[in-house]
């Protein structure tokens, strides 16, 4: 007996369709389902990507937009918030990398990844981009 990758019910080995849910059973679906079943459930939570996104948004909204505008209106050097937000962007990049690396290590150990890889890539890419924009603001 094999397991349907869609409804997870047992079906005969020679089935081309699941008679429980009616979906077609293909080789790729079975291989993917068996690979996912081999990975054990991970008890720890990978929150590095969420921390990276949080740092990115705090740096961009809190420091670049709000404090940059307030400092400029008051007459204080407006580059100060850009320095602080640049540090936050660097930390966000490290958090994104830590999330991807933690998931890879968990996969090697046989556990399911618990971080969101897309969030990690967003934190890295956007932090690099906005960090470079900040760099031009500080230099000019």
Image (cartoon, rainbow, N blue to C red):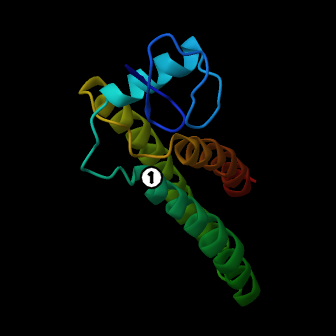
Q: Residue at x 62, y 46 (%)?
A: 122
Q: Position of residue 87 (x, y in %)?
A: 49, 56
In the visual, does 95 lie left or right of 61?
Answer: left
Please determine whether, in this image, residue 82 is positioned above or below residue 115.
Answer: below
Badge 1 local density, few (<14 within 10 Å), some, or many (20+)?
some
* Nearer the observer, 139 or 135: 135
Element carrying mark 1: helix
Viewport quadrant of the C terminus: bottom right
Viewport quadrant of the N terminus: top left
Q: For mark 1, what is the residue?
A: 91
Q: Residue at x 43, y 46 (%)?
A: 115
Image quadrant assignment for residue 12 = top left
In the visual, does 92 lie left or right of 46?
Answer: right
Count the marks: 1
Image quadrant assignment for residue 81 = bottom right
Please determine whether, in this image, residue 120 is positioned above or below residue 86.
Answer: above
Q: Position of residue 89 (x, y in %)?
A: 54, 53
Q: Residue at x 58, y 65 (%)?
A: 59
Please determine whether, in this image, residue 98 is positioned above or below residue 15.
Answer: below
Q: Position of residue 46 (x, y in %)?
A: 35, 49
Please determine whether, in this image, residue 135 is positioned above or below residue 76.
Answer: above
In the visual, does 50 lie left or right of 26?
Answer: left
* Nearer the observer, 62 or 75: 62
Q: Position of residue 51 (x, y in %)?
A: 44, 59
* Nearer the observer, 112 or 94: 112
* Nearer the observer, 41 or 50: 41
In the visual, does 83 lie left or right of 130?
Answer: left
């Amino acid at each position: 007996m094999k397991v349907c990758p869609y409804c997870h019910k047992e079906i005969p080995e020679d089935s081309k369709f699941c008679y429980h849910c009616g979906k077609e059973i293909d080789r790729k679906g079975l291989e993917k389902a068996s690979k996912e079943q081999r990975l054990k459930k991970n008890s720890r939570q990978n929150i590095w990507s969420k921390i990276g996104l949080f740092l990115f948004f705090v740096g961009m909204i809190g420091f670049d937009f709000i404090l940059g505008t307030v400092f400029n209106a008051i007459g204080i050097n407006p580059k100060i918030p850009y320095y602080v937000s640049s540090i936050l962007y660097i930390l966000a990049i490290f958090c994104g990398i830590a999330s991807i690396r933690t998931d890879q290590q968990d996969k090697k150990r046989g556990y399911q990844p618990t971080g969101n890889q897309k969030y990690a890539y967003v934190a890295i890419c956007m932090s690099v981009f906005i960090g470079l924009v900040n760099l031009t603001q500080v230099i000019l």
